[in-house]
Image (spheres, grey):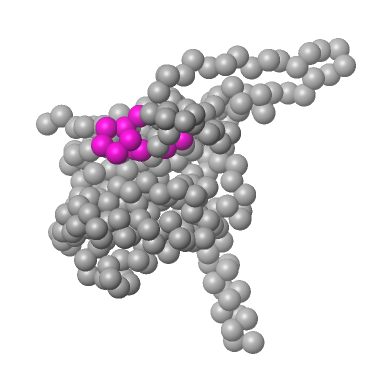
Amino acid sequence: MLYTRKLSLYVTALLSCLLLSGCAGMFVSDSSDIVTDDRSTREIWSDNNIEFEAAALGNKPPFSGKVRVAASSFRGKVVLIGQAPTEELSAQVEEHVEKIAGVKKVYNQLRVQPMINVSQMSRDSWITAKVKSALVRENKLKGVSVKVITENSEVFLFGYVTPENADVATETARNVSGVKLVIRGFEIADLATIEAKTAPAPTSDAKAPVAEAPVVDASAEDTTVEKTPPVDSPEGNIMEGDVVIDRSGDIVEESIEN
């Protein structure tokens, strides 16, 4: 009986976290160009479990005391954030995460360096708070949820957003003091598909409106449908829904000019 009560309380607490934390990238807005994360409850649960298990690796051998790991997952596509002292340990963390149930692809953004100290962690928390505050104040992002993770003054941005939302959020974060680098890990929505889904149903006397295809930068990809890149395509390792990146070919990095 006691076990049942504990399990019930655990499930209730976790569901409350999913609904209130915003980490699932939910959007609430009356604007037609705001997209909604359409992941199922099961998918959201799986992504949160992946993030939890990936972060827990930092407390398990052979990584305990050597590696700092955080993760962000969207439909099983996982971005690893943190530090590892050697390339070998970084690769081992990636291998362990690939074996977690529900993981489809891993984007390893672990920096090969010693773990950051408590003082830097405190600064990172302050930077995250300032970035979140700046995003909330930005009128063009009303109703848009952007997940922010800061590691060693590098700001990672995540969420299911439109191309315009992604650009505005990136530019907003770049102008926050203390930010050295902005890494975009967004899932970019296809506006043509969104408009087609939200268009009113046709009546017997009228034809259904046809949504015009948006003008999207050639470097952006449609994430509403999983695509299989052609053989030898240079974009085969690019994180779907975002633009080509500088460092690893998976995440967009925006340098900050001092």
Along the line of sight, the residue nearer the viewer: 136 or 151:
151
At which x and y percent is residue 196?
66, 24
Question: How many numbered callouts?
Answer: 0
Image quarter where the C terminus lies is top left
| Residue 29 visible, this orientation | no
Q: Is residue 99 rendered magenta in the image?
A: no
- When the figure is inspected, residue 241 is found, relative to residue 38, above or below; the finding is above
Q: Residue at x 79, y 20 (%)?
A: 202
Residue 98, quarter of picture: bottom left
View extreme (front): residue = 231
Magenta segment boundaries in residue numbering: 239-251
At which x and y percent is residue 222?
52, 28
Image quarter where the N terminus lies is bottom right
| Residue 250 visible, this orientation | yes
Chief SS of the magenta region: loop
Q: Residue at x 30, y 55 (%)?
A: 91
The reply, left or right, for residue 58 in relation to residue 13 is left
Along the line of sight, the residue nearer the viewer: 8 or 40:
40
View extreme (right): residue = 204
At which x and y percent is residue 174?
25, 33
- When the figure is inspected, residue 82 is found, relative to residue 200, above or below; the finding is below
Q: Residue at x 57, y 68 (%)?
A: 11
Q: Is residue 247 rendered magenta in the image?
A: yes
The reply, left or right, for residue 5 in relation to residue 72 is right
View extreme (left): residue = 258
The reply, left or right, for residue 146 in relation to residue 120 is right
Along the line of sight, the residue nearer the viewer: 136 or 125:
125
Residue 53, quarter of picture: bottom left
At which x and y percent is residue 139?
41, 29
- When the figure is inspected, residue 74 is found, relative to residue 258, above or below; the finding is below
